[in-house]
Image (spheres, grey):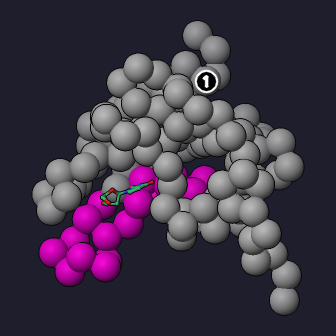
Amino acid sequence: MNNLTHLLTLAREAAAKAYCPYSHFAVGAAVESTDGRFYVGCNVENISYPVGTCAEAGAIAAMIAGGSTKIKTIVVYASSAQLITPCGACRQRIAEFSVPETLICLADDNGIRRQTGIQDLLPDSFTEF
Ligand code: THU
């Protein structure tokens, strides 16, 4: 099994654990860090809607807590007709922990449907102050 296949499996498994009683839209994310470790996250909603967190946020938080610092590849999966793309806030989160080669893979039940980079998803992002 190659790493992309493994990441897709991890993202799907994470989505199966999503806590999404309000939207009923389960999302899973899986990160391989540049030091070769794997981290997962799912969306975790809240009755106070803005408190909910995205799958990408969970996976990135797990990566940082696990001691890794940069994303080599992130797979984001949802079983949806329209291919998922990360929300604006998660694009900024991914940008924070990206390297120029970071690969962002968007997946549905047919597998990984799009491979892109943060420059495409978040051009001209806020990087310095
Ligand atoms: N969601 C994610 O977890 N990741 C995305 O990339 C898009 C949206 C979640 C947030 C919310 O729990 C649900 O999907 C519907 O927006």
Going 16% across and 75% down the picture, which residue do you hit? 47
User: Is residue 55 at all visible to an observer of this figure?
Assistant: yes
Please tell me in which quadrant of the rendered image residue 17 appears: top left
User: Is residue 69 at all visible to an observer of this figure?
Assistant: no
Q: Secondary structure at mark 1?
A: helix
Task: Check the image and report above or below for 88 versus 37.
Answer: below
Q: Nearer the viewer, residue 39 or 126?
A: 126
Magenta stretch in the rendered image: 44-69
Task: Check the image and report above or below for 67 versus 77.
Answer: below
Position of 66 compared to 14: left or right?
right
Q: The N terminus is located in which quarter?
A: top right
In the image, is residue 102 part of the stretch drawn in magenta? no
Going 20% across and 80% down the picture, which residue do you hit? 48
Q: Nearer the viewer, residue 5 or 40?
A: 5
On the image, the x and y values in percent for residue 88 come to 54, 67
Task: Check the image and report above or below for 105 versus 129.
Answer: above
Q: Which residue is mark 1?
A: 4
Going 55% across and 19% down the picture, which residue do you hit? 5
**Which residue is at the far top?**
1
Position of 119 compared to 85: left or right?
right
Please tell me in which quadrant of the rendered image residue 31 appears: top right
On the image, the x and y values in percent for residue 105 come to 59, 36
In the image, is residue 63 part of the stretch drawn in magenta? yes
Q: Nearer the viewer, residue 66 or 14?
A: 14
Query: Label 1 CB, ligand 1: below 8 Å?
Result: no
Q: Nearer the viewer, residue 102 or 83?
A: 83
Residue kind at label 1, given as amino acid type: Leu
Quadrant observed for ligand 1 in the rendered image: bottom left
On the image, the x and y values in percent for residue 36 come to 72, 35
Position of 80 compared to 59: left or right?
left
Going 24% across and 76% down the picture, which residue do you hit? 49
